Image (cartoon, helix red, strand yellow):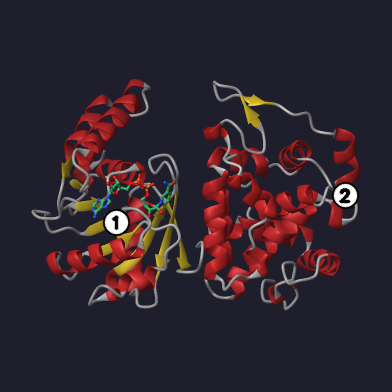
Amino acid sequence: MDSEATASPPAPVAVLGAGTMGSGIAQVAAAAGHDVTLVDVAPGAAAAAVGRVRESVARLADRGRLPAEDAEVIASLVRGSESLAGLPECGLVIEAVPEDLALKRSLFAELAQHQPSTTVLATNTSSLDVSAIAEAVPDPERVLGLHFFNPPPLMRLVEVVHGHDTSEAYLEHVVGLMRAWGKTPVRCASTPGFIVNRVARPFYGEAQRVVHDGIADPATVDWILRERGGFRMGPFELTDLIGQDVNLAVGTSVWEQTGRDERYAPTAFQRDLVAAGRLGRKSGSGVYSYAADGTLVSEEPDLRLAARLVGGPVEHDPLARTVAMLVNEAVDLVRRGEATAEDIDVAMRLGANYPWGPIARGREIGLHVVADQLRRLDSAYPGGRYRPSPALTDGSLG
Ligand code: NAD
């Protein structure tokens, strides 16, 4: 850590909620030299999280990825608390309590009373509207989203989300701060799913439709997306890892928040899996089955079928369908002014491990070609899911 380079010590940071995300975010802030208070109302949770931070940095030191002295300094900067009382005046407070709007609003209202008017109040929400949280605060210009990805110490991407009233000065300040923390910030509006969870929807939805329609089996679709598409994992193995229930909940939330737009409609395929308790690795079965030690009972892809489908008519090509829909989603986000093309490409590479940014990929394929593919899909499957974004053909993206 380079504490000598800074003229004044970094302002204290508070993290509310010491669960999966809170403890990781606290570690990141302490590694950047901040005094961090981790607050959790569950008895013993904050202390346990401080213990997890200690173990985590000690492991990094053991593996030679952090000098042992730095690990000790980082651990010494994090303290736990079971209430907001006694919180120091902070430069930044990051809320990471459960995804419940009423809970988050009440915490923000309380924070606004106790923290100076210059303290940035951030939420790590994945799906709630930042503006709706900010309404609980008399000065909503200082409220914004800081959407870290799991696990925060390893994932570089942070979505910096602005509500209706968030001030540009606070946004710029936080973008700079995230860079100083070693993160790669991207900016976006408080739109359902933000960038990553919105643009990624068709990665799962197209695969589920292809299987539901009997075009290919899951193992073959996964093989195509991985081996021919360059994705690190296929959509079925990935959703089994994430949890079919968790993935369905994110998709359903985006669908509800977009007024049940057909583009995001949950599939019968995934609903049936969840209803049957086939949640993925954690339940022993999902799309695939897993042995007691969690290893996949592998299913063989049909390589002859894969060879026939890829490069054939778009309606039956799992890869072309998926890519066209990812590009469509990404360009629509730009068209609505919710994020820039550059930020979307960075976000999908870093936040979802995609082999390319979808806008760059769309330009390589040709945006008009993508629009044609979507028109063909739209005639094969009418209803609005495949409607091409005007941004594919209006020349606005070059
Ligand atoms: P979690 O359940 O692991 O942790 C939440 C913690 O908040 C719990 O320890 C709970 O005791 C504590 N808590 C509850 N009420 C509180 C209060 N009033 N004051 C202080 N602490 C309180 O949850 P998580 O997975 O860390 O998620 C936290 C937030 O981050 C959610 O908004 C979630 O949507 C978001 N998020 C989660 C992930 C993820 O992968 N888990 C990724 C990005 C964002």
- Is residue 304 left or right of 143 when viewed as pictured? right
Q: Write the residue at 45% across / 61% down.
A: 127
- Is residue 360 left or right of 170 when viewed as pictured? right
Instruction: State the count of labels.
Output: 2
Q: Residue furthest front?
A: 276
Amino acid type at image mark 2: Gly
Question: Where on the picture, by quarter, is residue 154?
Answer: top left
Question: Where on the picture, by quarter, is residue 75?
Answer: top left
Mark 1, ligand 1, within 8 Å: the answer is yes
Q: In the image, is residue 133 above or below residue 97?
A: below
The percent position of residue 38, horizontal first and vertical second, equals 21, 46
- Is residue 245 left or right of 300 when viewed as pictured? left
Split into 4 quadrants, where in the image is the N terminus?
A: top left
Which residue occupies the foreground of this view, 252 or 115? 252
Marking on residue 95: 1
The percent position of residue 50, horizontal first and vertical second, equals 22, 36
